[in-house]
Image (cartoon, helix red, strand yellow):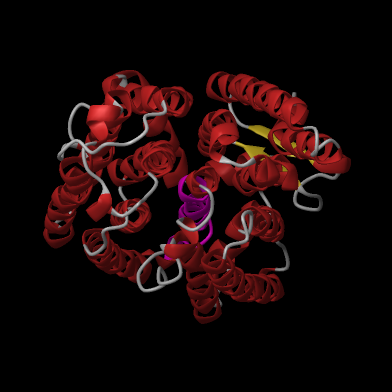
Amino acid sequence: MSNLAVLPIALPLLFGIIVAFIHNRIKIVRTISKLFAIINLVVVSYIAYSVINDGSIILETGGWEAPYGIVLVADLLSIILVLTTNIIAVACVFYAPKSLSEKQEAFYFYAFFFMLISGVSGAFLTGDLFNLFVFFEVLLMASYGLIVLGGGKVQLRESIKYVLINLFSSMIFVTTISFLYSVVGTVNMAQIAERVQESNQGGILTTIGILLFFVFGTKAALFPLYYWLPKPYTVPNPVVSAVFGALLTKVGIYAILRTYTLIFVDQSNYAHELFIWIAGFTLIFGVIGALSTNNIKLIIAYNIIPAVGFMIMGIGIFTETAISGTVYYLIHDMIIKAALFLLVGAVSFLMGTSDLRKLSGFIHHYPLLGWLFFIAAFVLAGIPPFSGFVGKLLLLNSAFESGNIAIAIIGLIGSLLILLSLMRIFVSGFWGEKTPIKVNKQAANQFSLPIIFLLCFSVLLGVGAELIYPTIADISSYLMDPDVYIDSVLKE
């Protein structure tokens, strides 16, 4: 049973190797990639069902007991995020053939894609801080391969910036892990948490906590570390942008959530107040960015930033309700960001431009895609009864209850401005005067199905909140009691 924990990492890695050997046989690669993505989703769904019903699955690789060996921990939080990752992966694999040229597909797109899914899943599942760094590097190497597909001048410039920023943060990450190891003598997260509680070296641990937050904050695109984000997420192919926007920043948020509910719990007095301030500035500057551009891809990319602001707000408030809101919003945002990037990619492909000033009357030619965007905008902005509303309601309620009125007001205003940034696209680009263009209904239908697939899950998270929330509340209770994680991994 414990071996199930490695499957979400091993299977996509195996699938990536298989498709790499036949990368030039495009039709076969497309078919088996779709099949592989579905198989992986089914396997992960079964693992998630087992974890929800029977508790966490702990795999001690090579028979080495924790903390001496590498440990994989499929607990409620990690497996739900892995499941969400694979839902997005299925949609993207079905979207990719129409979005990519055959040359791009043949240039190992599917191999890099499955490698990235493996790295993201590993980052969520690992119980070892050093292996968190390793899986970060796995997903980053795959993302380096994906971001350069196409080879345009702007793409090359942004990919260099993306690589340099991530290399710098990775260097700080591995250095910080070595500092932490010198203090506590282990990289197993459960044992680190146990020894940090017993340690009297508060000053050193505070410094280490700040350095780790800097690393994870850079990857999550928090203020003021978000400066690198918007362009690298818009210059690749839309399907790559969807994977990046849905998954990569969320791994950074997950790392902050995990380490600051497990390892640096005693640092809460200074850290959580700082998180709330950072959340406020992240919300403000992200929304300003989204309102400042006429590029529809950039509008969606900038909207990643206020979303991570909402998530860090919940970690800063640090009540069970707030953590529930962060987890709910994290799952919701992964799905809706993927759907929105796929939507604007479809619009750009069908209309031949991503400039809002040159778009008009899209919904007259492609009504289904137009109304799907309208629904997605409401989901992202948190309009009831969609999933964004549930996460924001939990976060804003916890902010008011804890006396953090300022951040609650910023969150409310930010939500309205997020809706405004998306309604600009709908009103100006979709609902404007009908322009004469060559209509490609076949392509529109191929784009629509993966987007509908994702939006169904977004709607389910909203209207089915009564069924889903108890599991999210269990995750919150679990995170608020780090001893449960420690005991389950170290078997104490």
Could you tell me if residue 374 is visible in this image? Answer: yes
Q: Looking at the rendering, in which quadrant would you find the C terminus?
A: top right
Instruction: Specify whether residue 401 is painted magenta.
Output: no
Q: Residue at x 29, y 34 (%)?
A: 373
Instruction: Specify whether residue 258 is painted magenta.
Output: yes
Residue closest to the eye, 115 or 428: 428
Residue closest to the eye, 1 or 236: 236
Asked where in the image residue 36 lies, by quadrant, the reply is: top right
Residue 20: x %, y % from top left: 81, 41
The answer to whether 102 appears left or right of 310 in the picture is right
Asked where in the image residue 117 lies, by quadrant, the reply is: top right
Residue 491: x %, y % from top left: 69, 40
Q: Looking at the rendering, in which quadrant would you find the N terminus?
A: top right
Question: Is 205 situated above or below 417?
Answer: below
Could you tell me if residue 118 is visible in this image? Answer: no
Question: Is 253 situated above or below 375?
Answer: below
Q: How many labels does the image show?
A: 0
Q: Residue at x 36, y 74 (%)?
A: 224
The answer to whether 23 appears left or right of 395 in the picture is right
Residue 353: x %, y % from top left: 37, 50
Residue 454: x %, y % from top left: 43, 28
What span is in magenta? Answer: 244-266
Q: Which residue is drawn at 36% across and 37% down?
A: 328
The chief SS type of the magenta part is helix
Question: Is 135 situated above or below 176?
Answer: above
The answer to whether 141 appears left or right of 214 in the picture is right
Residue closest to the eye, 138 or 203: 138
The answer to whether 263 appears left or right of 23 in the picture is left
Residue closest to the eye, 87 or 420: 420
